[in-house]
Amino acid sequence: MNLQLSEEHLMIQKAARDFAQNELKPGVIERDEHQKFPAEQIKMLGELGFMGMMVDPKYGGSGMDTISYLLAIEEISKVDASASVVLSVNNSLVCWGLEHFGSEDQKQKYLVPLAKGEKIGAFCLSEPEAGSDATSQRTTAIDMGDHYLLNGTKNWITNGSTASTYIVMAQTDVSKGSRGINALIIERGMEGFIVGAKENKLGIRGSDTHTLLFNDVKVPKENRIGDDGIGFKFAMKTLAGGRIGIAAQALGIAGGAYELALEYSKVRSAFGKVISQHQAIQFKLADMATEIEAARLLVYKAAWDKDNGHDYGTSGAMAKLYASKVAMEVTVEAVQVHGGYGFVKEYHVERLMRDAKITQIYEGTSEVQKIVIARSVLG
Ligand code: COS
């Protein structure tokens, strides 16, 4: 495994970093305060090729590797995790799922505009009573011959009201359990599809999280992804890659808070010297730097597994479990280094601390990652 980033990786990293500093940072506090979706910035990121980074250029994507994608997510998350989750869901759940499991017609119709950033996608698995216990889908897709009749509710859906294309998991044959679940492509505007209430969240407040309601939505058979009954496996395989994206988001949130704490420690004085000269602060910075480096190696290892055709379910789960823990710890310490200033919005670290928490919850809680890892180590 080569730990050296290529020239191309460094260029992508710099492009994402510049974009985050120039386009995302200026309004990030206000968007967080007012729960405002970064619509303009997401459009620009689409035009720059960040919405379908790993998709084959023949389907409108940028044809890059997983490391490139993670570097972009990491840099954007240092500044605005509400923007990076839009990228993460679109790239690694919706585009990846369609490219690897969709039919040629589905790719032309749905993947191309998503990869070009002309449209936004959403991935709909969670339900009021099926979060971690994802096989217990209550949303039903009854086979009516030429179409499915979709009924049910999905919860906490990222890009809920901004998406145009939704991949919805639903139970077709309850007697078959997880093998009776299908993944269906739903378009915004289909009759009976209602975007419900927006969530008022602790963190990633600029991202647009909604309940979705499906009342007798007629979904054409050609909108089913893959063979009948593969919906749960589709969701699990897709989430395995998504989790690496969220691990990179956590890494970015931690890195952003650390960089702010480091800078602040060099300009703030107390007891007659800058606080970076106090060992209490030096030890915090040393711990933060070490934890971030360890998380980074786990994240890159998972990406390397994915890019080299190895199984990445376990390494991705390890990366997400560890990086999200580091994100929480580092952001809490970054607030502490800032003292009273850390507790107010203008210094950014309190937002990063609030944003960090979701990385331990979505795309599989830390407990779910431990289930995945334990199953792997126990065989
Ligand atoms: N890849 C392919 N198939 C997988 C898989 C994976 N990563 N994980 C599970 N499966 C398959 C299993 O092989 C099994 O198939 P068979 O019946 O053909 O053997 C089927 O899916 C059911 O799996 P399992 O019995 O392991 O399901 P469990 O109910 O025990 O659930 C966990 C397993 C908890 C790991 C799963 O439900 C999960 O990941 N939950 C969290 C979901 C999540 O991330 N939610 C967030 C939503 S997106 S914000």
Image (cartoon, rainbow, N blue to C red):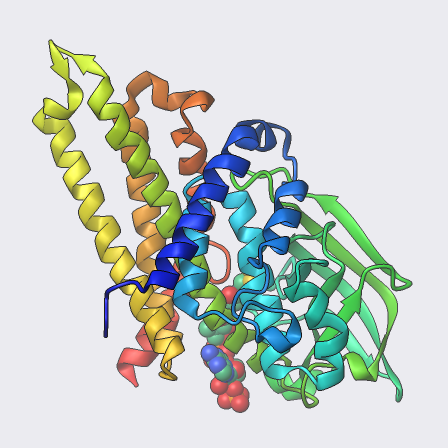
Which picture quadrant has residue 91?
bottom right
Q: Position of residue 118 (x, y in %)?
A: 72, 58
Which picture quadrant has residue 333?
top left
Q: Is residue 187 left or right of residue 225?
A: right
Q: Position of residue 127 (x, y in %)?
A: 65, 61
Asked if one can make out residue 42 in the rendered structure from this viewpoint, the answer is: yes
Question: Closest to the observer: 27 or 209?
Answer: 27
Residue in the image at 53% along x and 66% along y? 92
Residue in the image at 26% along x and 50% along y? 292
Question: Closest to the observer: 142 or 328?
Answer: 328
Question: Closest to the observer: 274 or 295?
Answer: 274
Q: Is residue 18 left or right of residue 314?
A: right
Q: Position of residue 14 (x, y in %)?
A: 40, 49
Q: Residue furthest front?
A: 7
Tell me if residue 167 comes above or below residue 258 in the rendering: below
Asked if one can make out residue 171 in the rendered structure from this viewpoint, the answer is: no
Looking at the figure, which quarter contains the N terminus?
Answer: bottom left
Q: Residue furthest top?
A: 272
Residue in the image at 62% along x and 86% along y? 179
Q: Position of residue 340 (x, y in %)?
A: 33, 17
Q: Is residue 257 left or right of residue 249?
A: left
Residue in the image at 38% along x and 48% along y? 252
Looking at the figure, which quarter contains the C terminus?
Answer: bottom left
How many numbered discs sit on the rendered protein? Answer: 0
